[in-house]
Image: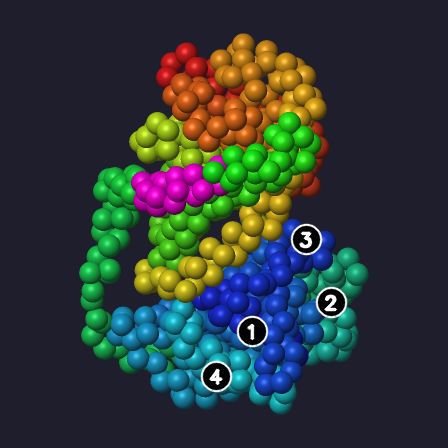
Amino acid sequence: MKIALMGQPNSGKSTIFNHVAGYKAVTSNFPGKTVKYELTKFNLLGRIVELVDLPGTYSLTSFDLAELEARKYLLKANVDVVINVIDASLLSRSLELTLQLLELKLPMVICLNMIDEAERKGIKIDIEKLSKVFGAPVVPAVAIKGRGIKELFSTAYEVGEKKKIGKTINFSKDVEEVITQLSAQIKKKQIEQEFNIPERFLALKYLENDSYFMENYEKKSNDLFKKIVHFQNILKETHGRQSDVVISSERHHLSMNIYESVVSLTKPHKSAIDYLDNILMHPFLGYISLGLIFYLFFNLIFGAGKIVEEPLLDYFYRLIPLIEKSINPNTLSFSIISGIIQGLAGGIAIVLPYLFPFLFGLAILEDLGYLPRIAFLLDAFLHKIGLHGKAIIPFILGYGCTVPAIMATRILESERDRFIASVLATMIPCAARMTIIFALVAFYISPQAALTIYILNIIVIIISGKILSRLLPEITPGMILEIPAYHIPSIKVALAKTWLRMKEFIFVAWPLLIIGSTVLSLLQYFKVDNYINQFFSPLTSFLLGLPIVVGTTLIFGILRKELSMLMLIQAIGTSNVAAVMSATQIMTFTIFVIFYVPCVATIAVLWREIGIKRTLFTVVFTFVLATILATITRFVY
């Protein structure tokens, strides 16, 4: 059995999905497209069920790529049952999508998620009456707490087995007559069989002038096309508006009527959280709050990381002298063992102490609902550098990992916007670069110096964006951004998200780190590192004023950013970087690594997303920028 989760953005679909998937989902692309959906398999009542989390969708009539692909999936993927996830606190607006899903005549269950939030707002929903109106089961749930999930999927399984179809609710009499007449013409031509969808749904798409369906018959069947235009004109003449607006208005009217018939309003329960946006979204206080939150966020990460880093590093670096007693330090076997230990030490003692609190904090901010508010506050800045407001989404993702950030630029309609956003996303300090900032700058200089790097990073991104936008001028449209309600984060869910994001480091980056550390030990054993360091010395030693041994570390940094720091510790021969490098050198090294050539995984994604020429431009642009900034840092800091 195949179950599809369908709902508007921020309705809680993914929370429901992750309760079932346990954060072990497989991410897939729609065939021939770059829009992603999540897929998992689980055991339900003794049977293996496939669950698909489709992209958040406001309407089945849309020009948005993600929404179009979600609709195509429903039309073509032989879904057995659809779970329409609704934010119960926004019921009236959500019902428009429900009406469209019913027109597909697929077995459906309605999930009233966040029912507790609706009750807090004074919205009391008659669930039994709503179920009778739609002829489909309605299950209340609080997904973030896991309430109602078991009942939801049991009901979905039962509906899928019985293939129970909900009611199709009719529009106004005159509109319904036009739909019926056009449906009869479609049935006569047997067009619905080609799309394998109900003729009523197809008739509505034609009346809405849906380009996906219209382009198929504008040339193929001129006779039908003329009839479609005829019926569109009838609605236009009788209502004084375009036919697509008429259909949209009918759905909106129906949604409001249904909402009013099943909802009774009581006095809302106000709490302190309801007044938070008066400060956090304020035109002036909002930015002060943002700065304060970031300041506390980074200081907490540094504080937590420092407590763990020092004792762990001491433990690992006490091991090497013990091994020296058993194995001659001048032998090849000692070099290999030493490299492996230093690779393990780097992961456990340096990266994880900062990576875990960072990802956990990010998950808390995400579940709290603060990230969209950051997007809202920073939207004005993006327009000043000539980008669409949607670009904030990949930029926020970039603080976790650059690869998904670049993939997220697909949501931008303009190729020019996707290119600029991709270049700028490579400059955002990902979790790997964050560990470098904290383990070097915050640890050896100060947390305030680390925060200064983030501020500098934002300034550089703004200036770079401005330059690229001037080179590629284009008018950028505004952004409609939904701000979800605040939610008290679940520690269990936040930990699960943190583990999901840390897995990439543990299973991909850490083995590379150990291999890289071992390779560096071998290079040192065979004295090959001297030649590499000499080759890079005009850049590292002459221009940037860094120790000559830094050359090899920069190569490893292209594999994974955190490798450059860990290889630095190995190359200088001590975990106490301050004993070998001055504060200026530490800052110069960090600035260069933050901005220079993206890692291999990022280059591969850039190649696929923006092409080889633009990828090469990005590599050269970031390298030149890193060199300029690091050189300035050397002489100014």
Using the image, tell me which numbered label, if any, was put on residue 101.
1
Residue shown at the point (53%, 72%) measured from the top left? 20
Q: In the image, is residue 554 above or below residue 181?
A: above
Identify the residue under disc 3.
33
Does label 2 or label 1 sit earlier along the sequence?
A: 1
Instruction: Measure how far apart labels 2 and 1 are at the Cα level.
Output: 25 Å
Does label 2 or label 4 sit earlier along the sequence?
A: 4
Using the image, tell me which numbered label, if any, was put on residue 465.
none
Quadrant location, the C terminus: top left
Residue shown at the point (56%, 50%) measured from the top left? 506
Q: Amino acid at mark 3?
A: Lys
Residue shown at the point (59%, 63%) measured from the top left? 25
Left or right of 114 in this view: 154: right
Left or right of 296 in this view: 108: right
Magenta highlight range? 297-317
Point out residue 605 in the picture as x, y percentages from the top left corner.
65, 41
Disc 4, disc 1: CB below 8 Å? no
Q: Amino acid at mark 1?
A: Leu
Identify the residue under disc 2.
224
Does label 2 or label 3 sit earlier along the sequence?
A: 3
Disc 2, disc 3: CB below 8 Å? no
Kindly state the secondary structure of the residue where label 3 is placed: loop
Kindly state the secondary structure of the residue where label 2 is placed: helix
Kindly state the secondary structure of the residue where label 1 is placed: helix
Using the image, tell me which numbered label, if any, was put on residue 151.
4
Instruction: Measure how far apart labels 4 and 1 are at the Cα level.
Output: 21 Å
Say which of 360 and 123 sits in front: 360
Q: In the image, is residue 327 above or below residue 510?
A: above
